[in-house]
Image (cartoon, rainbow, N blue to C red):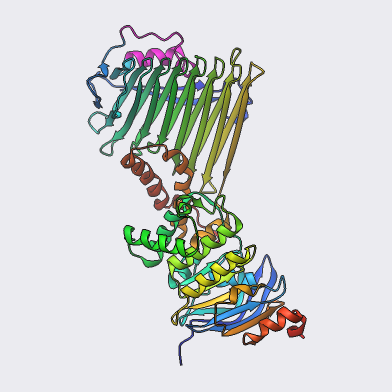
Amino acid sequence: MQKNLLEIKDLKATVEGKLILNGVDLTIRPGEVHVLMGPNGAGKSTLANVIMGDPRFEVEEGNIVFEGEDISKEKPDARARKGIFLSFQAPEEIPGVTLENFLRASRAACSGKPVKIFAFKDELSENMKALGMDEAYAKRYLNVGFSGGEKKKSEILQLAMMNPKLAILDETDSGLDVDAVKLISENIARFRNENNAILIITHITKILQNLPIDYVHVLADGKIVKTGDASIVDTIVQEGFSSVLG
Amino acid sequence: MITHAKKIDRMPERTWSWLKVNTADIFLYAPEDKKEESVLIQASDKIEVRKDFTGVTFKTDPSKHLMNEEIESFIEQNSNIRYYIRIPKNHKEEEPIRITLEITDEYNVIGEDIVIEAEENSESTIIVEYRSKGKEEGYHSGRTRVLVHEKACLKLVRAQLFHDEVKHNDILGAQVQKEGKLTMIQAEMGSSGSTAGWNVLLSGEESEVNLDLVYVGEKEKKLDFTSRIEYQAAKTNGQVRARGVLLGKSKKILRDTLDFVSGSKEAKGREEEDVLMLSKNVRNISVPLLFCGEDDVQGEHAASSGRPSDSTLFYLMSRGLSEAEAKKLLAESKFAAILEEMKEEALKEEILSYLRVAIEEGGYMSEGF
């Protein structure tokens, strides 16, 4: 049996004393695609941020194990270097740092090796083309003046360039037009292989169309209340969350 | 060595004394003998370089605003580096003129007095590097006066890269005549403390100045900057941009004055400062001042300062950058808009290396992560 990539047990997390995650259990193995759904305020983004190590959240109980190692107390950069990637719902704007330089710095930090410039540029160009991004964006300051869609593409570009073991995509499809969702979905499918895993947080199912879904989880009131196959997505789309929350 | 410690008024109008912004501490150092310290000037043979100021006249000496008679006479009596540099009329100097002043353990006092005259319709870049060797205490007191004639274009890059045992005082006064343009980039990166001031008179119609300042404060360093642009003629345009990073227990003050005097119709001015504070113990004071003696002018000022937000740091760290690397990237990004105006890649990299070292040496705070 394949080893677990991510194993979360009884995770409880608070923000400013308020309990947001109330005992989450989740196991993800390499090669799997998981979908996390749930009503607004259920704690989906909190879970994504807590896995990444956002210091605004306090882990009160439980632990997060990645490749057999407890990372609950690790800083975000250490988690990233181990192979966890979070595509942000609202990516930060960083004036003065170009997208290309940021990607190069991230690549160097994660690999621990100097980046070979020409190979890096070729790879960047190829990935930008695949995402339908104007290559001029590489020279622009990170997310500054980017439209909502370009910001999300920039996140998926970072995913492609960093090639993590676990990609968590927090509503990467929100605010995108149908063509952009399709393009992003194709690029996520391009990234997927038997050695990595994806956790997709979404309200819209279009992003899932190119992906073989292994598990769908429904999060409500800080807990995963239902886990099943892709058919849950259709049920939720047709009948709403009440149909699965009981 | 003769030393004079002085407090000098640096506000155009005095304000409450408890604000402690009215005066700057000036330390003047004079060498016991007037042996010339190490200085290197590289320029083509079209550029006049001489050691006396014979025949050099300023209608109004723009540096006077930053000193009193006592300091002026001290500089005139004690300077051991005195150069007059002239870019002739209609001449375009292709390569930058380079001036390198170096403090060493043996020659540790520099009293610098330089006059630069960019004649009518000339075009040139001058790079002044202030460097030091060794580890002993050193002292630099400088006065630079610049005259930009009609339609001349002068770019002045000044990089203060002293080691942290060097005390540094600097005054620059400039006058820009009709349709002349002065661009200055000043990098205050080294020294144990800096007191620096610039005063620019836009005396000719449609004359222009762009003053850019980058600085880093670390440990217990005190930085005292004064910048003033006087708009004397119509359609003049003067802008000041300052970008700084403060660490450790450093203290910084920037008094930044735009003075639109009578006759400056349709003049435009802007002053802006952006400071990244990477320690809870730094003190940052910005004093933007606007004076209007003419009604048809545009003057703007903007100042922002703060620590990097948790969400920004989290975003950068989620991509594998350590807290120090993330802060270095944010600090470098503050300088980016100004340094991208510099073509001298090696010098630019050296300026950034001062910033990186300051952050690596632990001046940054660690919290939350």
Q: Is residue A23 above or below residue B353?
A: below
Does the image show residue B301?
A: yes
Name the residue at 24% across, 33% down. Answer: B105
Number of marks: 0
Quadrant of the rendering where the C terminus of chain A is positioned: bottom right
**Left or right: B351, with B280 as reference point:** left
**Left or right: B124, with A89 as reference point:** left
Q: Is residue A2 above or below residue B51?
A: below
Would you say residue B75 sits in the magenta stretch?
yes
From the top left corner, tell me how far across and down residue B27 is, in percent.
41, 25
From the top left corner, tell me how far across and down residue A133 is, in percent.
50, 58
Residue found farthest to the bottom: A1
Can you tell which quarter of the image residue A49 is in? Answer: bottom right
Name the residue at 46% across, 93% down. Answer: A1
Q: Is residue B24 above or below residue B344?
A: above
Residue found farthest to the front: A179
Q: Nearer the viewer, residue A76 or A146?
A: A146
Residue found farthest to the top: B55
Would you say residue B181 sits in the magenta stretch?
no
Q: Nearer the viewer, residue B157 or B124?
A: B124
Name the residue at 44% across, 72% down. Answer: A82
Does the image show residue B250?
A: no
From the top left corner, tell me how far across and down residue B237 is, in percent.
53, 23
**Left or right: B186, with B104 as reference point:** right
Can you tell which quarter of the image residue B181 is in? Answer: top left
Q: Nearer the viewer, residue A69 or A223?
A: A223
From the top left corner, tell me how far across and down residue B63 is, in percent.
44, 17
Magenta highlight range:
B54-77
Q: Is residue B245 above or below residue B257?
A: below
